[in-house]
Amino acid sequence: MTIIKKLFEKREITALMFLIFLFLGVSLRNPDFINAQSISTVLKGSVLYIFLAVGMTFVLLTGGIDVSVGAILGISAAISATMIRDGSSVILSVALAITIGLIIGLINGIGVAVVKVPPIIMTLGTLGIIRGIMIIYTNGRWVENLPDSFKMASQASFGPLNVYFLLAVITVILVQLYFSKTKKGKYFAAIGDNIEGSVLVGIPVNKMIIIAYAISGLCASIAGVIFTSQVGFVTSNTGLDIEMVAIAACVLGGVSLSGGIGSVVGASIGAIIMTAINSALIFLKVPSFWNKFIQGLLLIIIVVSDVMIHKCFQEKARKQRLSARSESTKDTVIENDLPEESIFLGGNEQ
Amino acid sequence: MNRLKELKGKWELSLVLFLIIEVLIFGMINPRFFKINVLMNSANDFVTVAIIALFMSLVIIVGGIDISMGSVVGLTSVVMGLLWQELGLNIWIALSIAIAVGALCGAFNGYLVAYIGVQAMVATLGTSFLYAGMSLVIIGFSGISAAEGITGFPDSFRALGHGKPFGIPSSLIIFSTLILIAYIILHKTTYGRRIFLTGINREAAEFSGIKTKLVILSTHVLVGVAAAISGMYITSYLSSSRADHGATLTLSVITAVVLGGTAITGGQGSIIGTALASVIIGLMTLGLQMSGLSTRYVGIGIGILLVVSVAIKSSLGEGNLFSNIKRKLQLGNG
Amino acid sequence: MSEKKSLIKLKEIYKSFDDNEVLKGVSLELSEGEIVAIIGGNGAGKSTLMKIIMGIYPLDRGEIYIGNENVRMNSTSIALEKGIYLVPQEPLLFPNMTVEENVLIGFSQNKTLLREKLRKLIDHLGWDICLTRKAATLSIAEQQLVEILRGLLREAKILILDEPTSTLTFNEIESFFNLMKDLQTKGIGMLYITHRLTEVFEIATDVVILRDGGITVNGPVANFTKKMLIKGLMPDNVEHEETKFDSEKTDYHKDPVLKLESLSGYGFNNVSFSVYAGEILGLAGVVGSGRTELAEAIFGIGEITGGDVLLKGSSIKNYNTKEIVNMGLNYVPEDRHLNGIFDIADVKLNTTSSILSQISKFFLNRKKEQKITQKYIDDFRIKVTGQDQLLKSLSGGNQQKVVIGRTLSSNPQVIILDEPTRGIDAGARGDVYKIIQELKKLGLAILLISSDFEEIHELADRAQVMYHGTNRIELSKEEISMDTLTQAAFGVQ
């Protein structure tokens, strides 16, 4: 039992194991799935989601949520695509698109931390606003005919790995180091873990929340630029509902929506899983209309088992603790104490 | 002094004021806006959102949220279309089964949230994929073109969306009836009281002998039924059954509920508020169209309304995170 | 006192919340190596004062000097910078982080150096604590140690300890006091909040009594006796007399209304006793002795693993809360804020919340609700502006009266009161006592759970004492005294 418990405490590992089993299982039916080309297709396709999931992790750790990332992705894709098509320098266009993402993120952060609008409302609001602006900006038309050089950048590879994927991996490693090794990196999870405690140890709670949303916006706009380069055109529906995939990826990778728990490594593995499922279905010759259904089913199974396992352990621990109190009259028994509050429970009904 | 009640009263009043100003402004831009027929017909467009929003209020008041309702709209639309076309069922039997499917979808959400203990947001995120996926799978198997959907419904069914008994559009009749039902359920019954009490303090509700799990589950069932009704309406109104009918509803629905004065943290809210907010959003769509502007601006308008209204409310100091924390810290002082 | 270096000095601190003035000009001083005990009843303003010192609440008026510098405390980081550290009553650790992460969070120095420092500190203190454990797995006592480690590693000069012993066992308290003495010799000043008078004489150098937001006693401990402190805690106009209620004879020949037969569950074991109509049975016990778990299990909320509960002769152990309420048993929960009140609902909604289905089947019956609510407002003299006043704007005492009203509205024959006077002021306490007496006269069977032994002493006709989940001892009215209760509750043979 303790092994199971340990494993579930490291959700990155379970997620990774699931990913490996997915590849192995599918390759039993169709060995082509495990060759270099199909794997690299999956990884390439997941870059977008990895960036979104990294940004989302910052926000989720603080106990918030950001549903505006799809819209931010859309508008920065539209801006960068339009500018590049019209002949602006790639660097300038990308820089502008990313700056806009950052600014939107800042606005979200200020709304949540300073004005105290609940995160879901704040980001739902910006989602609507930005989508509207985007449609006006593109006039509802497709942005296409981008220069080939820009599109080809997405095909470039460094050794066996796609350049963008490499960029994503480096980002994930850097962010992971930031979270685990620096003083401020721990603040995000601390805020989601116990906000009163954070205030007490002098964490600048509002500032860190603003930073989290700003980073989420930044990551979403990077994803937008990558989208433009990979796909080569932008429609008014670009990024629609993609926030749901990003949140699902985080949850799959063990990031708790109640805050305080999770890592970017886990979230990224979750993002790769979401992409891998789509590819796997193709290789299994399952019609693609199953994608969404299977993603949803998987998400529910993982979340439900997660909640039930933690509930079970927590309940057991509680009973043990209470029984220990009443069992004997030794004073020492209280030492196996656990605090009352639910810590593991992913689902407390707030 | 009952500050909260005052605020709530004021809130509904300010919604009414806002509505009047909105009508006046659009009317000045385009006098046709003042025509009673035009105003009444606007219900055709916003009723899909309003039906769900009315019952979503119950879910949010009880302390949850449901973001899977857009998918349920699509799923029920597809289920009904297929039962009618492929299995040759009577259209009204197909419709009843579709509504039962909506209730089941809601019940599954409610089960995950109340009995398993999954966070409402997470659970319904998962089921929104699941239900949308189901409709795609059903369509995929039946070999119908997803873009066109199923069409050619009998006139009796189309009357649901297009009929005008006594000169009143059927959408308005559906809307009014559901307002009345939701109002009675939430504000006049002991069940509605249990919804509020559970939303304010679930533990205390348990200690008062309220079966909170059942209360939470049932609100999800109600919103599932509402989503199904909305799905039936839109299928009839657009005369086609498609999987993506509800795809973009979520933002509007939650905006209507929150703009209507329901606290996203649960425990307070009103049906009248939600109904007023739905009309405000609906008329804004119509007004922008008639002013010659594109409906593309609607999203911007809704987004601003949502954020600004909540910001105003939170700056009035009711139930935001930090005041809650402060209150918690104050508990030590009795 | 003047030779020692002053660490912190408060001058005329005022603070109100809404219209409620919590601190009315509090001044006190803490010097190196002093342990100033701050005592006072619930609601006296102790916690508020500490939070002002920590910069969590801004003060309305007054000055704070640290050393000789006038400091504006408007954020916790300032307080931390000035070497002040608060060990809160309920530890505010990060449950998903390890002990080490919890202690080291917020430091900017080199991690390896800090770790070394922490290791040395732990060695020096002689504590046995595993740094890689998650905070979630620690006992409350261990969590408190981690909090103190945090403060020490920050080289805090001023430690604020908010009722640290309330959750500790005897042995733990002893080692905790040794630690405090050790810190004292190092020149650290401590503000020690407590409500246990014996501890004041054991550990403190000075004592301050806060009452209704003002200071009534202030000086070296040696200048005071226990009696003088008790007098300082009492309201001016009330002489400290044991309010003896004339105890009417309970008829013990009738069948008991509530009977526990070797009831066992999680946190309590093999508990048997009976409660008779028209009597108050006191159930004394310290926090963690299993009293609340027992009460919740009877009420259909906790799990029962063995034995039986009989209400008027029939078993209720397989019924849910709603059914139990309808059968004639109701419960006033221990934690009012968590389990008792609906804070953003009004008085009426609160009063009728447990009898909704009794008032009407389907539709609300507002007239009936108003009638019932008004009855309790009048009977209990609940101070409200109207039935539609929100609960969160009532004082603790009035909130508690509403909760008791709600419990009674279901017409129970048995009522379980769990810490009914926790967190309410002296006046309201008297009112609640009167209500309890009235209920007894009406012939209700009352199970009064309390860790306030004076309360049991004052009210109960008989008492059961819980210790480690079992009722060890039954005391008759004559046998009930502070001594007998304390001894039994702490397991002294």
Image: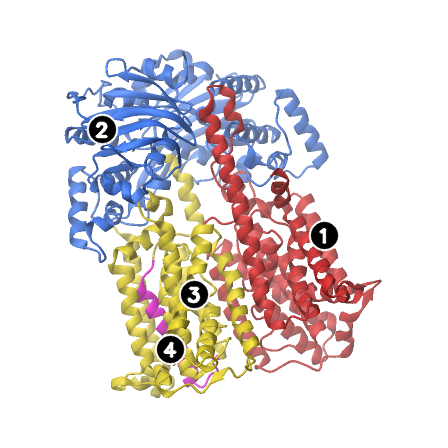
Q: Which residues are magenta?
A: B269-295
* Depth order, front residue of C61/B124: B124
Chain A on-screen colour: red
* Residue that label 1 marks: A174
Q: Secondary structure at mark 2?
A: helix
Callout 1 touching callout 4 (CB < 8 Å): no
Instruction: Report in which chain the residue with disc 1 lies.
Output: A
Instruction: Find residue B49 and report its horizontal and vertical position in percent.
Output: 40, 72
Q: Estimate the spatial distance between the alpha carbons at disc 2 and disc 1, rounded to whole Å.
A: 63 Å
* Same chain letter for marks 2 and 1: no
Instruction: Report in which chain the residue with disc 3 lies.
Output: B
Q: Residue at x 33, y 31 (%)?
A: C308
The answer to if B278 sits in the magenta stretch is yes
* Depth order, front residue of B312/B164: B164
Chain B on-screen colour: yellow
Q: Main secondary structure of the magenta part?
A: helix
C90 shown above or below B110: above
The answer to if B177 sits in the magenta stretch is no
Q: Secondary structure at mark 1?
A: helix
Q: Secondary structure at mark 4?
A: helix
Mark number, residue B254: 3
Mark number, residue B283: 4
Q: Work out which quarter of the rendered image holds the C terminus of chain B and state it.
A: top left
* Same chain letter for marks 3 and 4: yes
> Residue flagged by tag 4: what amino acid is it?
Leu
Instruction: Find residue A105 and report its horizontal and vertical position in percent.
Output: 58, 61
Q: Would you say B221 lies left or right of A163 here?
A: left
> Residue flagged by tag 3: what amino acid is it?
Ile
